[in-house]
Amino acid sequence: MAKADCIIAHHVQKTHSRAYAEMFCVSSVDILTQYYDIFAKKKLEGKHDLRIATVFSYVANEYVKDNNGNIELDELNNFDFNRVAEPEEKYQKLSMHSRDKLEKYIGDYNKMFGTKHSTKDSQAFYNYYNEISKRVKNKEIDILLVVNMFLTGFDSKTLNMLFVDKNLKYHGLIQAFSRTNRILDDKKSHGNIVCFRNLKNATDDAIALFSNKNAKEDIILKPYGEYINRFNQVYAELLKITPTVESVNDLASEDDILEFVQKFRELIRIKNTLSTFADYEELDLLMPSQDFEDYKSKYLDIHDKAKTSAKEKVSILNDVDFELELIHRDEVNVAYILMLLAKLNIGTKEDLEKKKKEIKELLEGQIQLRSKKILIEEFINENLPNITEADQVEGQFEEFWSLERANALISLAKAENLDLTKLQEVIAQYLFSQKLPLVNEIRPMLTIMPGLRDRNSTFSRIKDKILEFIETFIEGV
């Protein structure tokens, strides 16, 4: 089915590499079961690895047949859970088919998460409903299939995508579309709706009814072409400031640097928005993709320099939000780099140098790898030439990394007069709680207590160094 293929094909793009969840609402339980079975079949065929789940009220949906799929009320609030446990004879007449289907789908869910839910009684069904809600919020479910449930009253900031294959109107449409508009961060600056039916007039009418006739200009994203035009316009303005990538190094004043940062940051924002359009193609942009990556590297250099100088002097760059989450790519990590390294011994000497250059550029452009750049380049230059088999790369890198990590930890302890064992305990606690150590946790680590005047700066410096160690040697490895 083309619609299921569309959802599978665009899931990674629409959810920013599975950073968020999706919901797919359809017009009836019968349609839902068809879709679910298609997704399940495609998963068995290896066409996706998405975690699919569903929930529907098998009595209420069969009693209320709405061919248009309009939402009148919150289905859960109007569902009588006690009816689930009605006598078997009456139940067979009402909803044997849909209950059997739901029981099977809950069985799939139980296998996926190691749970024991069922539809045997009202409490069991309610427990399943509540757990589905939590797992969507925790991004443990990729796509949730529904008819009416969760389209009203469900609030999850991690839900950013709604596929619609049913007719909606007025408050039902607004309620459904609003499931995706909980702003979470700069990467999720808006919700995404894909309609497999023409709901434009219904959407315009709903917005006009509940807001005003001109509100849709502020509520709905502009057409794709407008974002393309704006990107190209800002790119032209960027070239006036920095005609070439290398000219970024020649920016004389902080005002000039700030102007570059603001222009490139706007390009990042627009590109982030463009990436949510199904018809987005980089060829529509006047800026070559390699130029974007090269300018991005300079942008990150400025960020790193500003971060360092912020501790030493006042600068207009100190308070600039570089919005690094917009250029963070979870799929590029040390494991990915190792895969590329394993291929370095394949091909001619020219191929080798070209691949090395590509890896170094990748290290420059990925914010989560920049702290590891020097060490990875050291491994490439000094260790990799001595490795003869591709399958030895990962093991050799792990040995190299473990040694470097141990040496760095010892160096940190010596430089700051810290007890090594207690330092290791504090780092382990941070990895568990994601909270930097408090003053009363740093104090016991010190083997030499600084004077009163220097204590605050010392504690702050130690915190920064601990976080820097974790970013370099632990996160993303």
Image: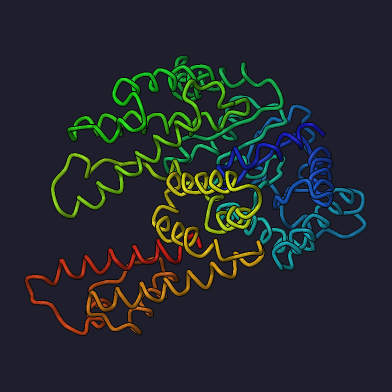
Q: From what the image shows, is residue 6 above or below residue 204?
A: below
Where residue 187 appears, as percent x and y from the top left, is 46, 41
Where residue 124 appears, as percent x and y from the top left, is 72, 63
Residue at the image point whose x is 46% and y is 24% from the top: 287
Report whether 321 appears left or right of 325: left
Where residue 94 appears, as percent x and y from the top left, is 87, 48
Which image quadrant is residue 242 in?
A: top left
Report whether 317 appears left or right of 187: left
Report whether 444 appears left or right of 331: left
Residue at the image point whose x is 80% and y is 50% from the top: 46
Which image quadrant is residue 134 in?
A: bottom right
Q: Nearer the viewer, residue 402 or 458?
A: 402
Q: Nearer the viewer, residue 417 or 193?
A: 417
Report whether 84 appears left or right of 304: right
Residue at the image point whose x is 68% and y is 46% from the top: 144
Q: Nearer the viewer, residue 140 or 225?
A: 225
User: From this viewpoint, which residue is outermost toward the front?
Assistant: 349
